[in-house]
Image: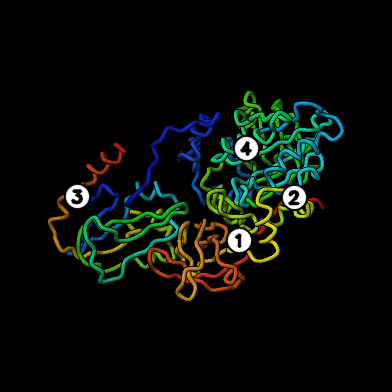
Amino acid sequence: MAQAEASEPLKPLLLDALWRARAKKFGGFAGYDMPLEFEGLIPEHNWTRTNAGLFDVSHMGPCFLSLNEGMGQPGAHERVSAIIETLVPADIAALELGQVRYSQILNAEGGVLDDLMIARAVAPERAGMLYIVVNAGCKEQDFALIAKAAGSVAKLERADDQVLLALQGPKAHEVMARLAPETAEMTFMTTRRMNISGARCLVARSGYTGEDGFEILVHPDEAKAFAELLLAQPEVKPIGLGARDSLRLEAGLCLYGHELDETISPIEAGLAWSIQKSRREAANFPGAQRILRELKEKPARKRVGIKPLERAPAREGVEIHANGAKIGVVCSGGFSPTLNAPISMGYVTPEFSKVGTRVDLIVRGQARPAEIVSLPFVPHRYARKP
Amino acid sequence: MKYTEEHEWVRMDGDVAVVGISAYAAEQLGDVVYVELPAIGAKVVKGKDMAVVESAKAASDVYAPISGEIVAVNDALGSAPETVNAGAEAGGWFVKIKPSNAGEMDALMDAGAYKTFVEGL
């Protein structure tokens, strides 16, 4: 048997000792030494789908972008939004207090440099501040791009020295309501600052598993006690990076470096919903020409869900064929514990993107039948506004 | 039972060698979700790819611990790949090989040597 091992020096998480005492397996991801598995990928995955899973995602890149002058004054939010809107195609100016939007940092050709979450601050004195979370592997690039766009008008303050925890699953809201009753009033994609049992927290009702849940930025001084408090709740178990990936794959969500890269546009990736009408009309974001053209005509390729009809998983890099010719490639693939079957996502030419289309996956040189299916593989269960 | 440094095991059953992956390897892989086995009659060569085992997170090659001809495969792994985790060195066997060179068995580690090898990893 062959097993790959990485050996470059890795940064430990702030809560390394807490996880090390519980995890079965650690491994490198984006330069961090991360817990990969606790009880086992499949039991952890299933626990998150039925209870509440606790993930340490402190490797990611939380930061704050704030105006240098005029914070809290009329027009402050519009001014800070104008900065970030030079990089992303989402309407940030239109965010309500505390609202979060998913977007992408684009290059001049409309390719995706990273995907990210952007939230508007709630408190009146913080008008002119945005809370932004970018991906671990892209954060140095992203922070530099945002700081450059901010120029002398605003400053970027990194918050990746804090602890970012994600509590995900159908029972996450019960746990949070017990510890912080005001979280019960929060709907999906909103944020609030609060103190939870002495821990200073910035709570977002969001996540990347397809489940309802929360992503909580915690002050480093109180993070250990807060994580222990969560772990002491009967519905909560720690979950590793392995299950995080299988959960997001079932949820049909993009992972940078797999479904997204600098050559792929948000339209190809099926993310047109994240580009609001106001920005399309203004056409004032990087790569607008390509993106608007792809919205009107067809993009060269489309992201699709793929269901192998046999048991063999089709992983990243597997070629997708139809009628004996290559029509695409798998960008993520593996095993779905919820469906007890292999699942993949890939890019195919538009004529083969229709749900129900039969294709072949070339796994280790052998063509295996598969079908294009709709995404997500497992329905989302977000706590949207009633 | 003999073992390879690549974590396969071999046990002679009459003149046929039963082959699988070690309990240590199964534990390292985690939940096995798919096993791809060679065809009966296929010729395998010591140290070369013989089968594939996929856990929830990755695919790994399994190498032939000895050379010979595949005379049986464990069809039960097709519908119940988790058998590899439940009994890696028993019910979770992969293939049976008719050895072409009996001497190859002698070069493999015995259980004690393999245990020492794994402890050193």
For the residue marked with disc 1, what is the amino acid? Answer: Phe
Is residue A271 placed above or below B16 in the rendered structure? above
Residue at the farthest top position: A221
Left or right: residue A283 versus residue B4 is: right
If you read the primary sequence from the N terminus, does the residue marked by circle 1 or circle 4 appear first? 4
Along the line of sight, the residue nearer the viewer: A5 or B68: A5
Tags 3 and 2 both on a single chain: no
Q: Quadrant of residue B71?
A: bottom left
Tags 3 and 1 both on a single chain: no
> In the rendering, at what x and y percent does residue B102 appear?
13, 59
If you read the primary sequence from the N terminus, does the residue marked by circle 2 or circle 1 appear first? 1
Q: Which mark is residue A182?
A: none
Q: Residue at x 59, y 56 (%)?
A: A250
**Helix, strand or loop at disc 2?**
loop
**Helix, strand or loop at disc 3?**
loop
Q: Residue at x 72, y 46 (%)?
A: A101
Tags 2 and 4 both on a single chain: yes
Can you identify the residue that label 3 sits on? B108
Q: Chain of mark 3?
A: B
Q: Chain of mark 2?
A: A
For the residue marked with disc 3, what is the amino acid? Answer: Leu
Alpha-carbon distance for marks 2 and 1? 19 Å
For the residue marked with disc 4, what is the amino acid? Answer: Leu
Can you identify the residue that label 1 sits on? A377
For the residue marked with disc 2, what is the amino acid? Answer: Ala
Q: Nearer the viewer, mark 3 or mark 2?
A: 2
Alpha-carbon distance for marks 3 and 1? 45 Å
Q: Nearer the viewer, mark 3 or mark 4?
A: 4
Can you identify the residue that label 2 sits on? A383
Tell how many labels. 4
Can you identify the residue that label 4 sits on? A145
> In the rendering, at what x and y percent does residue A130 appear?
73, 36
